[in-house]
Image (cartoon, rainbow, N blue to C red):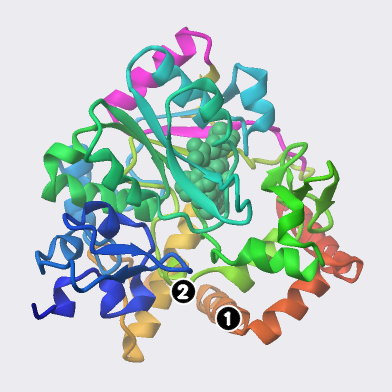
């Protein structure tokens, strides 16, 4: 059979636009698609029947906010705010101290997932973990018990094609919660249109805020640079230990090796973005999971002195009536400690975060398009005249750094420098800049 690449997901015509959400693999009716080493789909042409379904659900190239809005909210809400449509904003943390302590932020996602399972509102939660046998790689799975959920805690800042789980979901009954990143949610919403019976198994979508994922080889390379043998580790954390956590390897002999100086937020992670951010993440305009029922972000809000106000807490945006019901039921059942902060001006910092990602990506998309490169098609635009010179300059500098980061011979020594004690001045410089920003 002749396979027409234009019938396949975007990875087969413009690999650089593939989000690696795994949606194409999840829906393929003949299992002709599987994951390659770097989490892109690969094709077994003998199994492919050219049905074109993988192209239709692909979130890589065609990102119509109009369609995604209709599929999520059943109507046009017309927002152009990068926080998306929000009904209510909460801040809070998991009531269960084990969820709170082990979470990336306040452990609220795991608390909500447990509440949904415990009360029988779902039969399973689609979550992620570092692989037990290969802890430097992430994987998706369905958690059905408290203990299974515990393994899903924390952010894994590495690409995990969550939507591959739809292969498994086709063969199980019940209703499920999907916990996912923005691009994965775009893929799921498209699947809702193409395979409504399968998509109907998802009762609620909980989305994570996302500045960028990182390349799947990041943990591997960190271990290499730090001289740690992969076979000597039993776990790898991106936000391990005391909030806001640190990137660290947990050794089989019980030892813990920190991968960088300072904590997660004020340390090397900010530079890692430049070294490991995938190209497709750099041209994604959705930083707040706009098409989730509930979106969760870290509550990084600081006071005038630059100190965090909500340590070990998360912010939750309830976008749909279903989300408000679930939030209120989790609060009433004492699974979640959260309160309404919809009118609290402190939350402007989060709006800025999603806005920065969205606007920078727009500027980049437009520049790349003008230079003849393939880019995603967005139907939500910003006014070109509204873009400042400083925004354009920042985009250019960041793009240059990220291009350099793609070269292994530059990336590894830079990474080694930034995370060694010689990197401390860079981290301190950043902390100082942040403090000044919050004082002004
Ligand atoms: C790649 C990435 C980028 C992020 N960027 C930002 C950001 O810029 N700003 C911000 O405020 N917050 C960001 N977050 C979200 C933030 O780090 C926390 O995950 C979020 O606040 C939830 O915290 P929690 O304690 O409630 O979650 P927990 O209770 O610790 O649960 C975490 C949940 O996230 C899921 N998860 C973890 N990693 C992945 C992954 N790679 N793909 C899909 N699902 C995953 C887990 O399965 C688990 O269900 C990002 C998260 C990721 C994974």
Q: Quadrant of residue 245?
A: top right
Residue 206 % position (x, y): 40, 36
Q: Which residue is mark 1?
A: 406
Q: Residue at x 40, y 64 (%)?
A: 284
211 up-or-down from 275: above or below: above
Does the CB distance between marks 1 and 2 fall below 8 Å?
yes
**Left or right side of 382 for 417:** right
Q: Which residue is mark 2?
A: 279
- Residue positioned most to the top: 333
Query: Is residue 366 rendered magenta in the image?
Result: no
1 or 2: tag closer to the N-terminus: 2
Q: Which residues are magenta?
A: 307-335
Q: Residue at x 28, y 25 (%)?
A: 321
Badge 1 local density, few (<14 within 10 Å), some, or many (20+)?
some
The answer to whether residue 252 shows anywhere in this view is: yes
Residue 381 % position (x, y): 29, 66
**Left or right side of 186 for 39:** right
**Left or right side of 300 for 283:** left
Badge 2 local density, few (<14 within 10 Å), some, or many (20+)?
some
113 up-or-down from 435: above or below: above
Q: Residue at x 25, y 25 (%)?
A: 174
193 or 7: nearer the viewer: 7
The answer to whether residue 352 shows anywhere in this view is: no
382 or 294: nearer the viewer: 294
96 or 69: nearer the viewer: 96
Residue at mark 1 to residue at mark 2: CA–CA distance? 9 Å
Residue 23 % position (x, y): 29, 55
Residue 152 % position (x, y): 54, 36
SS type, badge 2: helix
């Amino acid at each position: 059979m002749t396979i027409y690449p234009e019938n396949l997901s975007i990875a087969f015509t413009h690999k650089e636009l593939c989000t690696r959400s795994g949606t194409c693999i999840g829906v393929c009716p003949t299992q002709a698609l599987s994951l390659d080493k770097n989490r892109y789909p690969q094709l077994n042409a003998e199994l492919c029947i050219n049905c074109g379904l993988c192209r239709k659900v692909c979130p890589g190239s065609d990102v119509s906010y109009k369609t995604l809005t209709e599929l999520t909210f059943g109507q046009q809400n017309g927002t152009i705010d990068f926080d998306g449509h929000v009904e209510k904003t909460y801040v809070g943390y998991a009531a269960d101290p084990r969820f709170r302590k082990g979470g990336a932020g306040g452990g609220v996602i795991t608390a909500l997932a447990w509440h949904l399972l415990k009360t029988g509102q779902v039969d399973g939660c689609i979550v992620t973990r570092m692989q037990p046998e290969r802890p430097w790689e992430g994987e998706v799975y369905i958690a059905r018990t408290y203990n299974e959920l515990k393994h899903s805690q924390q952010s894994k800042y590495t690409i995990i094609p969550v939507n591959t789980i739809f292969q498994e979901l086709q063969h199980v009954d019940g209703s499920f919660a999907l916990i996912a990143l923005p691009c994965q949610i775009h893929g799921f919403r498209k699947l809702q249109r193409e395979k409504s019976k399968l998509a109907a198994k998802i009762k609620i979508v909980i989305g994570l805020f996302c500045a960028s994922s990182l390349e799947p080889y990041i943990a591997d390379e960190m271990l290499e640079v730090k001289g740690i043998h992969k076979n000597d580790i039993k776990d790898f954390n991106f936000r391990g230990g005391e909030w806001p956590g640190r990137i660290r390897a947990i050794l089989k002999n019980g030892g813990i090796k920190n991968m960088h100086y300072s904590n997660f937020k004020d340390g090397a992670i900010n530079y890692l973005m430049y070294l490991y951010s995938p190209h497709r993440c750099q041209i994604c305009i959705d930083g707040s999971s706009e098409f989730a029922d509930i979106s969760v972000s870290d509550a990084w809000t600081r006071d005038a002195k630059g100190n965090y106000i909500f340590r070990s807490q998360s912010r939750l945006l309830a976008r749909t009536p279903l989300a408000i019901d679930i939030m209120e039921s989790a609060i009433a059942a004492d699974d979640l400690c959260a309160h309404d902060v919809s009118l609290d001006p402190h939350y402007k910092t989060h709006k800025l975060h999603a806005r920065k990602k969205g606007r920078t990506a727009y500027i980049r998309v437009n520049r790349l398009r003008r230079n003849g490169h393939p880019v995603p098609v967005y139907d939500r635009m910003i006014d070109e005249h509204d873009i400042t010179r400083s925004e354009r300059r920042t985009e250019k500098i960041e793009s240059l750094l990220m291009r350099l980061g793609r070269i292994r011979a530059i990336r590894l020594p830079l990474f080694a420098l930034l995370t060694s004690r010689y990197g401390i001045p860079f981290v301190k410089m950043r902390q100082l800049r942040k403090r000044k920003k919050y004082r002004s």
